[in-house]
Image (cartoon, rainbow, N blue to C red):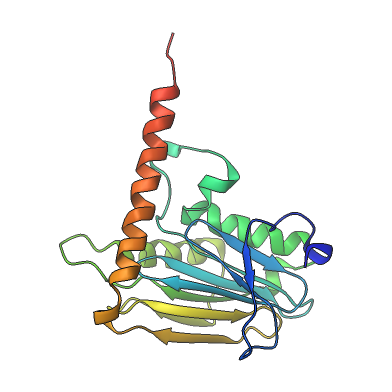
């Protein structure tokens, strides 16, 4: 696929599955993927949200996976880190589709995730859901499919050419791995922020 997409997404893990006709790009929290050629984008969502977006006329489509709505205090960092935030993940995905010939007025958008998979008073998934629905409203988009909230993690397979989505909800008893993965990712984000703070010298 490097010949099709250049170097833009070489960091994304690719795999094959006999059940599917196309190569699969597996994205993690903070990542997104766009393809002009028919592919499947796959991810696993707990409290995170993914937007599946394509231009059905030119067949360019992709998906993102974000964990937090937007950075605090207007922080802005590198491409590889900002896409963990919905505010950057949405803009990055849309812009890459437009760069490949898509038109904003034709974009077809589907939303998934935002499950309440943690016990406690803070519902991270609900915050992500509220944010992304408001983002689309402000930007003038109307999603054609929404599968958000509930208490289940989700496996999502998105076909970039047709816009077809396969969603498998995972039993709560089996979601420990997803919870641990999100917690580990959240810890990595905090560590990154601390390292940046420690690296800054004020004069």
Q: Is residue 109 visible?
A: yes
Give the quarter of the image for residue 116.
bottom left
Asked if residue 108 lies left or right of residue 47, the reply is right
Most extreme residue toward the right is 3
Q: Number of callouts in the render? A: 0
| Quarter in which the C terminus is drawn | top left
In front here: 163 or 134?
163
- Percent of width and height locating residue 52: 57, 73
Most extreme residue toward the bottom is 19
Asked if residue 57 lies left or right of residue 203, the reply is right
Kindly identify the residue that appears in the image at 52 percent across and 46 percent down.
81
Q: Is residue 127 visible?
A: no
Kindly identify the residue that appears in the image at 31 percent across and 57 percent down.
183
Give the quarter of the image for residue 62.
bottom right
Give the quarter of the image for residue 105.
bottom right
Q: Is residue 19 above or below residue 110?
A: below
Kindly identify the residue that appears in the image at 54 percent across and 82 percent down.
144
Q: Is residue 131 above or below residue 176?
A: above
- Percent of width and height locating residue 200: 44, 21
Kindly identify the residue that appears in the image at 45 percent across and 75 percent down.
112
Most extreme residue toward the top is 203
Asked if residue 143 lies left or right of residue 148, the reply is right
Q: Is residue 9 above or below residue 169?
A: above
- Percent of width and height locating residue 38: 74, 79
- Percent of width and height locating residue 162: 68, 86
| Quarter in which the N terminus is drawn | bottom right
């Amino acid at each position: 696929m490097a010949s099709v997409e250049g170097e833009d997404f070489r960091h994304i893990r690719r795999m094959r599955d006999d059940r599917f006709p196309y190569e699969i790009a597996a994205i993690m929290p903070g990542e997104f993927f766009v393809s002009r050629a028919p592919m499947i984008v796959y991810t696993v969502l707990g409290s995170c949200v993914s937007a599946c977006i394509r231009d059905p006329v030119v067949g360019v489509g992709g998906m993102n996976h974000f964990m937090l709505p937007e950075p605090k205090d207007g922080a802005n960092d590198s491409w590889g880190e900002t896409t963990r935030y919905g505010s950057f993940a949405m803009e990055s995905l849309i812009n890459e589709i437009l760069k490949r010939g898509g038109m904003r007025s034709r974009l077809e958008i589907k939303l998934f995730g935002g499950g309440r998979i943690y016990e406690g008073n803070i519902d991270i998934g609900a915050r992500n859901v509220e944010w992304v629905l408001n983002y689309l409203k402000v930007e003038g988009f109307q999603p054609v499919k929404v599968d958000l909230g509930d208490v289940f993690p989700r496996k999502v397979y998105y076909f970039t050419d047709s816009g077809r989505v396969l969603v498998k909800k995972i039993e709560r008893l089996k979601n420990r791995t997803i919870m641990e993965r999100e917690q580990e990712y959240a810890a990595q984000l905090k560590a990154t922020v601390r390292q940046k703070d420690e690296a800054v010298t004020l004069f």
